Amino acid sequence: MTLAAFIAVGRFGLGARPDERTGAAGDPRGWLKAQVVGVNPGPVALTGLPTGSDVVGRLVRAREAGREARQGAAPLPGGPAGGFGPGAGAVQGGLGPGAGATPLVPALTSPLAESESGDEPPLMRPSRRQPFAPLPAAAARGLAPGADTATAMLDPLKAFQREMRDLYRREAAAKIQIMATTDQPFRERLVTFWSNHFTVSVQRPVVAGLVGSFEREAIRPHVTGRFEDMLRAAIRHPAMLLYLDNARSIGPNSRAGQRNRRGLNENLAREVLELHTLGVAGGYGQDDVRAFAAILTGWSIVGPREADTGADGFVFRPLAHEPGDKTVLGVRYPEAGEAEGGAALAALARHPATARHLATKLARHFIADQPPAAAVARLERAYHEGGGDLGHLAGALVDSSEAWAEPLAKIKTPQDLVVSTLRLTGTGWPPERLVGHLRQLGQMPFSAPSPAGWPDEAGYWIGPEAMMRRIEWCALAGHRLASLVGPPTLLEAAIGPVARPETRQAVLQAPSAAEAITLVLASPEFQRR
Amino acid sequence: MFSRLTRCGVTRRQLLVGLPVTVALATRGFGPVAVALAAAPTTRRLVVVILRGALDGLAAVAPYGDPDYRQQRGPLALAEPGSEGGVLDLGGHYGLHPALAPLYDWYRNGELAVIHAVAGPYRGRSHFDGQDRLEDGLAVAPPAAPPVGDAGDSGWLNRALGALPLNRWFAQSRLGLAMGQTVPRVLRGAVPVGSWAPAALPEPSADLMQRLVQLYQGDPLLAPALDEGLRSQRFADAALAVAPAPVSPPGMVPTQPQGGGFPGLAATLAQFLNPETGPRVAVMELGGWDTHAGQGTVTGRLAEALRPLASGLATLARTLTPAVWRQTVVVVVTEFGRTVAANGTGGTDHGTGGCAFLVGGAVAGGRVITEWPGLARPALFEGRDLMPTLDLRAAIKGVLRDHLGVPAAAMDAVVFPDSAGAAPLSGLIRT
């Protein structure tokens, strides 16, 4: 494998599958560019999973049924309040944006507590170890078996929540399955990148059943299309409208606002400006946030009796929309209902600050934590030249000489590490179990700590404790792979073109095949891309 | 869960034997021979709790006596002390949120101080920038974000450690500890620190670890991380093995330390802090504060977030020995406050002024420290937020100076650059 092929499959792709090493060998750049031409209907692993409209329709009906059941039975303290699902404090969840986090997460644990089906060496079993104990709040609030059952019978909402947790597990497993097997790994990396750019996270349990459909419907179809289309699809999607609270935001002077004395929620508007488009230094002020929030009033999700009418779970509520003209970034938007939002998003997508923000993030992901200014400037130009076409931008990225200069500039995230390991041998490891492993490693799919998504910097991922976890996981994988492939073969496949003599020697001198493979996986070379 | 046995029953301690001599020597500080070693630069303990997502200070400590409170807060106003679901009175003007009831005893015996209408120098409303300034301690954003791991990527707490008098103790122990998988920016920097999180993946053999130590030699990122990881684990084993059973103050019903979450981490942290050889400074993080919708009053999202905070702090206090508790200050801070008025969805949006807490046996508490700006509309910051009248850095500098003994010379030059205008608050620490 040439160095260029190594970079193509590792940095741009998701790690080399055995067949990719030859596929990328002849023309690495051509191999990458071929992946971002045209649209991709989506991997087979995604068929059979529900649509966002489907899930949100059932969500609102379950909420209503829950309300009715509660009104019939003894009233529960607090009631359904502003959210859905028990809000517990997020522990090291960063800012769970609102409802806090984690009641969902502990339920997904015990990746290793369940029997490893006999295929791990017995010594590796955590016999004396308990899995990460569930949070007390979660245990007390309905995730503990038994205590939950009676409530669930009374409360259709509880049953629905449990179903959504199961759905989340399937979505997370499907995502890992795709990353491990796709023959368009560059495209898939871009999907993951943009999905992270427009984070919706299960840290907020209400969106647990929607995170997968969000990526499928708002991100995947546009990953080589126009940014403006992806932006609109992402902001309109029920997952985003719920995650960042816009579904209930009401214009204070609208008819609904006057009647209910309710009003604006500026969360989504602020994060669109700060995170999705202009960037925090993009030159907007508090007045722009308020005005943009007013523009987005009425952008909501279907109600319980509308659930079958909205084609995509989105509904615009004219009665909740703030009347009058609004001005954002000096541009006046005359009163035009839903169309105001479309116009404002289009303007944001074309704004120079947006081009700079997106170019910087892409360069950080594909080139270096501190991306070279020249590369950022070139990507920025490519964004403008292509009219915001993301396929064109991806091509410009492939043509950036900086991305090919330094083979190991980026540290792998836990997802990168796990996926690239799986792709090495092309063998299966139950994806459900890997979801649990990723939780231990701090990066379960669709569970970013905040609306800003997972950070793209080495310092976030390599702390002392995280380092130990990585090594522990590499040891686990080393034992699993040892029966499938010899260490020298694996070394060549994993890090051949960049392997240092020290690493080769350490692998050669390891006391067992399992430890030799562990050393390959844990080596500084394989921990980077 | 605390005992991390390696396979074949080899304990962490035996792992040391196989490690290079320098590392093995360094670990002696964790054992009973510690008395023979150099004294630590301080015997005091400082715990910093970062509430990520912006705590609503007006809900945590409600100014119920302010004439404009009820009208301005509307549906989010809490009831008067003494009424059902009412706040717990803090001297006639302020009241503690009922979900923080476990903290109330500390107020009454002078171990809790509230700092109100406080904010750092940051005046924007971005969580992410706000948390960066809260942690890096800079007055304004640096022109370019420093690369993580770079000398420029450091937090005020790490720099404060660096300003303490150097002695042999530094070479042998870790003064700073992050509870979590990653070290938050506030504790990152030139002074090496440890981190700890409960584990669930099986532990590799000592032999493999030794091979990796060699393989990582010279790697600027992985080598220090592995080194600290091994050190923390050895320390964890030692500290958790010798930690005394949790002590319950008389009259309190002992509760089992919680297995997980913030209270569980707090219990473990206390076990680290108790030994003479333990860290002096620790950081914990807690999320769930970004209450844009359904914030609630006695119940609701905010109450759900406050409960584990209160229970975690109570667990920490209960698990520390009385002697160590008397030497401890816990500083609870957040990136900014939230809007005074409720928004359209029963929540609050990003604001400016908020509140911070000082808790601990070393705190000169029992009071609310503030220059109260009032809640009348003209008194609000930009017509919507609680006006900050105290600089959070002034309070932190007061604690660093009077509690940890950070030299004044370092304070405005290194720890909080360009903060000379925010003179350290005096009298926060019991003398």
Image (cartoon, coloured by chain):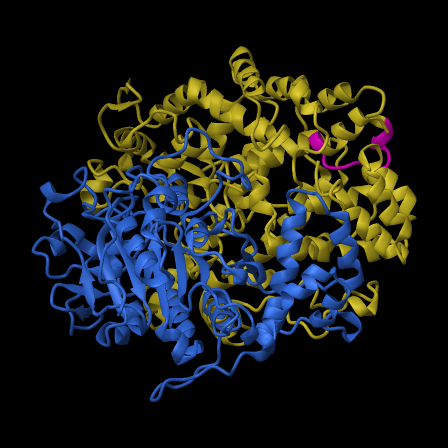
Chain colours: A yellow, B blue
Name which quarter of the figure residue B205 lies in.
bottom right
Q: Residue furthest left?
A: B67
Residue at x 80% of width, y 62% of height: B207
Q: Position of residue B386 (x, y in %)?
A: 19, 47
What range of the chain is rendered magenta? Answer: A11-22
Q: Which quadrant is the C terminus of chain A positioned in?
A: top right
- B332 vs A114, left or right, is left
| In the rendered image, the vertical position of residue B175 relative to residue A41, given as above or below | below
Q: Number of labelled discs?
A: 0
Task: From the viewer's side, name the closer residue of A406 and A9.
Answer: A406
Q: Position of residue B130 (x, y in %)?
A: 36, 42
Task: From the viewer's side, name the closer residue of A528 and B223.
Answer: B223
* Residue B316 inside the magenta-drawn segment: no
Q: Position of residue A96 (x, y in %)?
A: 44, 51
Task: From the viewer's side, name the closer residue of B162 and A475.
Answer: B162
- B316 vs B425, left or right, is right
| In the rendered image, the vertical position of residue B351 relative to residue B142, given as above or below | below
| In the rendered image, the vertical position of residue B184 relative to residue A135, given as above or below | above
- A393 vs B117, left or right, is right
| In the rendered image, the vertical position of residue B196 relative to residue A225, given as above or below | below
